[in-house]
Image (cartoon, rainbow, N blue to C red):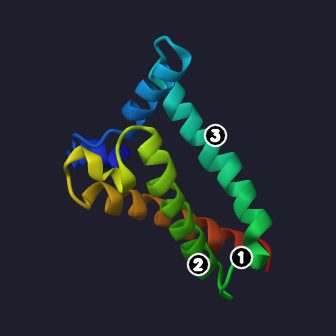
Amino acid sequence: MYLKSRLGLLPSFQPYESLQLALGRLTGGSVHPIVPWLLSYLNGSTVTGFSFGRLYQQLPGRAGAIKGLIFGVWCWTVMGLLFFPLLGLGVFSTGIGLGVWPALFSLAMLLTYSVVMGVVYDALNS
């Protein structure tokens, strides 16, 4: 997301801002901008990492990178079909009028994270 911001990529695709607005609607008040970032880091480092570790043996593939790739595609699908619509962005963020680019960007982010996580997890368990 930092690189996206610095390079000016997809400036109208702001998932953290959308999450902040959705949380504000849910709580009935304003939500500080740091809250969506903290939730994202908590989710990425704790929930996603724990889930990956628990599912590692059941994921198809022999190499950690392949397991990470499959896990990343699965997470991307869930995010695109469940979370983006809940934020008002539409399925795979198609509701914001940018075509497939937000979906591809979120896929690239998730695959980067999940493949690295798979490689590291494989290395630590060898």
The reply to whether the C-beta atoms of the residues labelled 3 and 2 are less than 8 Å apart is no
Residue 30: where, in percent of width, then height? 46, 13
Please state if 91 lies on the left or on the right of 62 as rendered: left
Total label count?
A: 3
Q: Secondary structure at mark 3?
A: helix
Q: Does residue 9 lie above or below 78 as drawn?
A: above
Q: Which residue is mark 3?
A: 42
Disc number for residue 65: 2
Residue that label 1 marks: 122
Name which residue type carries label 2: Ala
* Residue under the point 34% across and 59% down: 103
> Which comes sooner in the sequence, label 3 or label 2?
3
Residue 1 % position (x, y): 38, 46
Marks 1 and 2: in contact by CB < 8 Å? Answer: yes
Callout 1: few (<14), some (14-19), or many (20+) C-alpha neighbours within 10 Å?
some
Q: Position of residue 90 (x, y in %)?
A: 35, 47
Circle 3 Cα neighbour tier, 10 Å, few/some/many (<14 / 14–19 / ≥20): few
